[in-house]
Image (spheres, helix red, strand yellow):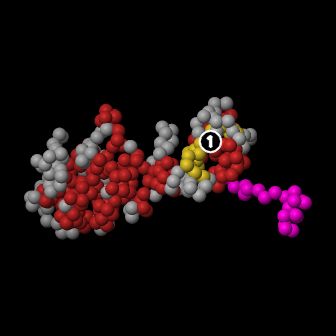
Amino acid sequence: MLNSLFEKSTNIKRSVPDTMEHVLRAMVARSANGVVSVAPGIAKRILEELNFPTQRRIDPSRVYDKRHAIIKGDWVEGHAITFTELPDGRLWLVDGQHRLTAISENDSPVPVTIRIVKVDTESEARHFYAGFDQKKSVRTDKQILDAVGIAAENGLSSRMANAVYAAAPLLLNRLEPVSGSVGIKKNPDMFLQHNKLEIVQEWSKEAREYEQIIKPAKKGLIVTMRTPGVLAVALYTLRHQPAMARQFWSGVAENDGLRKNDPRATLISDLLTRALSTGSIRQKVQQPALAWNAFAEGRDLKIIKCLDGAAITLHGTPLAKGRAA
């Protein structure tokens, strides 16, 4: 009672906390079609309080370009600065940090379009953030995977998650590479970000095992064992012939006293002597596939010959020679 009378007599009103979320929503609510005038101080607060948790580093050259556009009058307000709204009301800036940085360094407010997209989970927000791939702002595979948190979610190191992501088009196409602009245009689904992220999750069990298997390998060898062609073959064999695959890939990684012409020894030699930058991606798949087939069939292998146009087969798997597609 006393508190109520005191508030009434002193004209004190209880106000909503002045959080940046509240300020931003109020600005949008008063705006026309989401276009608001953002002052330098507000832009700075948004970056400090609402930026995406694992946002990439600022690129000074991109900030300079935005500042130049503001000064010269070439600024485009219709390119939305986008936030995700989480179920608990938090807002995350998922696209626009370079534009807001430029505004924070300006002398006066700048008109921008604000878009707020509601999401059901933090995971959905992370995938939304990862989806902003523009020609002048293409996020690297690592930035995408770090944003989504897929490595930790699936028990993989960041390096292995990146490797599986790079090998995804092969795993999506039964190890057959798709290359060239014409091939990519005909098979766009194999290069879509969400499809590649699903592949990392789908093959995470085999990837975790492979990561442990290759640990004993020396630096030069382990790098080649994570390349897309070798990795795709390894994951495929671990899924369809796990016992034999463990023996094969452990032997390659450990490289401990393998006899001459053992397919694993021949593969090691080929991996270490064939330059990573030479040969087509198809040859990089054929290379481990030929060694695997010889090992699985109990044959010696003196040399690895990758023939253009030869079918990619894997003994004991759905890609075995003669098996229907």
| Residue range highlighted in magenta | 1-20
- Indicate the position of residue 220 as horizontal and vertical percent values: 31, 59
Residue 242 located left or right of residue 179: left
Residue 128 located left or right of residue 285: right
Q: Is residue 54 magenta?
A: no
Q: Is residue 56 visible?
A: no
Residue 30 in the image: above or below residue 252: above
**Which quadrant would residue 184 be assigned to in this image?**
top left
Q: Is residue 47 visible?
A: yes
- Indicate the position of residue 193 as horizontal and vertical percent values: 40, 46
Q: Nearer the viewer, residue 115 or 58?
A: 115
Residue at 39% over, 54% down: 162
Residue 92 located left or right of residue 40: left
Q: Nearer the viewer, residue 264 or 76?
A: 76
Q: Is residue 13 magenta?
A: yes
- Indicate the position of residue 102 as horizontal and vertical percent values: 65, 42
Q: Quadrant of the N terminus?
A: bottom right
Residue at 59% over, 45% down: 116
Residue 65 located left or right of residue 17: left
**Which quadrant would residue 178 be assigned to in this image?**
top left
Disc 1 target residue: 114
Q: Nearer the viewer, residue 182 or 304?
A: 182
